[in-house]
């Protein structure tokens, strides 16, 4: 019995020592030198930019596990939204104009306002109360983010919630999620496990996903134009325009292509949370390609209903609304909603310059 106990102790000690060595190794491979967060690597499958790897994961994973960095800065400007905001607003470009805070982009592709609200919650949770008055949220809005929860999350769980429930960091209790460990120290402890996950993504998942995406779009005729070495040179085909109208009708799941109030109300909820926390809020009314704006019934419905909700935002508290819809030149988009890389620089510079002049 004593021999078994001794062997068990040696086994546990050896495992703990190995874990400690790997833990130290992660700080060599992934040194914590970055002072801002950016989910842009979610978009690398749709361009030829080299992916930038984070130990804490991509997209929703980065938001959940990487946000501890926010507490280290005195002032933070956090861009949130969906893929148009991911690609359209580049922190390094915006930072050139902003001197009173660190710019982050925590937008997540394929989001609706429900998920954006969850990102806001997580950012507020990660920001000490005495620093929240130096926190500024930038929410990029278009009709695409107003997809109903029943269509967006048929299983009732968002991508953010999926990441929250990983590794036992949060536990599910009914429909609510609550933190089961102080995320900053818990995530630090998980670094050896996270590096294994990240290496698997880098070696296997990334290549597999990109191959599948390439094959799908190679054979899906309306999307073939996206197979390009340079998205700045892409021209949208007429066939694709027809495809987008049909696809958005299917995705939005709306009656007569009308935008419902559900996700507008989520935006109102976000405004209330931000105002109550003493943080600041700016809503950016995003452009889409002009050809789509002129043709889309969903966009027409959004235009008809948005001002009522924008006025309600202003009644809740101080909110800045920036209209970028006029920046809708067809040549600036590589599809119906996403700016070309060269356009992203223009958008980022424009937004950065406006934010630099705001008093907040």
Image (cartoon, rainbow, N blue to C red):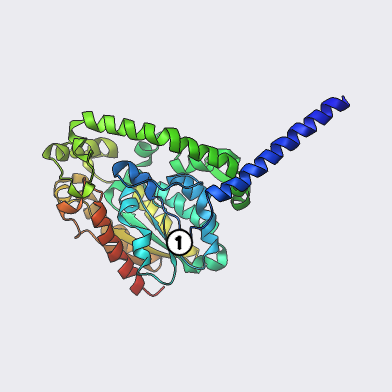
Q: Check the image and name the residue furthest to the right.
A: 2
Percent position of residue 258, x then y? 24, 44
Percent position of residue 321, x then y? 31, 64
Q: Which residue is mark 1?
A: 274
Identify the residue at horizontal 26%, vertical 53% (top origin): 341
Is residue 193 toward the left or the right of residue 5 in the image? left
Identify the residue at horizontal 24%, vertical 56% (top origin): 342
Neighbor class of circle 1 (other Cα within 10 Å; few <14, some 14-19, many 20+) is many
**Measured along the vertical axis of the image, is residue 152 above or below residue 212?**
below
Percent position of residue 188, x then y? 60, 49
- Residue 90: name its quadrant: bottom left
Is residue 87 toward the left or the right of residue 360 in the image? left
**Measured along the vertical axis of the image, is residue 245 above or below residue 286?**
above
Identify the residue at horizontal 11%, vertical 40% (top origin): 238
> Under tag 1, what secondary structure?
helix
Q: Check the image and name the residue furthest to the left.
A: 238
In this rendering, does residue 289 appear at all?
yes
- Residue 251: name its quadrant: top left
Work out which quarter of the rendered image holds the C terminus and state it.
bottom left
Front-lying residue, 352 or 308: 352
Is residue 153 toward the left or the right of residue 192 in the image? left
Front-lying residue, 224 or 173: 224
In this rendering, does residue 286 appear at all?
no
Percent position of residue 178, x then y? 58, 46
Is residue 111 toward the left or the right of residue 196 in the image? left
């Amino acid at each position: 019995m004593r021999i078994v106990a001794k062997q068990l102790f040696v086994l546990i000690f050896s495992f703990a020592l190995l874990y400690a060595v790997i833990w130290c190794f992660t700080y060599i491979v992934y040194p914590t030198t970055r002072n801002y967060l950016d989910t842009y690597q979610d978009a690398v499958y749709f361009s030829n930019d080299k992916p930038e790897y984070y130990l804490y994961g991509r997209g929703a994973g980065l938001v959940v596990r990487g946000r501890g960095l926010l507490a280290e800065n005195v002032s933070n400007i956090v861009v949130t939204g969906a893929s148009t905001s991911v690609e359209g607003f580049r922190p390094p470009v915006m930072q050139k104009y902003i001197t009173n805070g660190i710019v982050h982009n925590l937008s997540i592709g394929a989001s609706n306002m429900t998920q954006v609200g969850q990102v806001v919650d997580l950012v507020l949770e990660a920001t000490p109360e005495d620093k929240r008055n130096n926190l500024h949220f930038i929410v990029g809005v278009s009709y695409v983010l107003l997809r109903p929860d029943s269509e967006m999350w048929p299983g009732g769980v968002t991508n953010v919630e999926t990441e929250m429930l990983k590794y036992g960091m949060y536990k599910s209790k009914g429909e609510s999620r609550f933190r089961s460990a102080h995320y900053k120290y818990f995530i630090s402890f998980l670094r050896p496990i996270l590096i294994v996950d990240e290496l698997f993504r880098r070696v296997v998942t990334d290549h597999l996903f990109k191959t599948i995406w390439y094959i799908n779009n190679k054979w899906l005729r309306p999307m073939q134009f996206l197979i390009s070495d340079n998205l700045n040179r892409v021209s949208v085909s007429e066939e694709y325009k027809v495809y987008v109208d049909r696809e958005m009708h299917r995705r939005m799941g709306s009656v007569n292509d009308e935008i419902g109030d559900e996700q507008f109300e989520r935006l109102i909820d976000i405004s209330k949370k931000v105002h109550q926390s003493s943080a600041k809020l700016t809503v950016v009314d995003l452009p889409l390609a002009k050809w789509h704006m002129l043709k889309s019934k969903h966009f027409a419905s959004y235009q008809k209903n948005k001002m009522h909700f924008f006025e309600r935002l202003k009644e809740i508290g101080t909110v800045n609304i920036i209209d970028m819809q006029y920046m809708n030149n067809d040549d600036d988009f590589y599809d119906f909603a996403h700016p070309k890389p060269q356009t992203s620089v223009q958008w980022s510079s424009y937004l950065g310059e406006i934010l630099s002049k705001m008093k907040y």
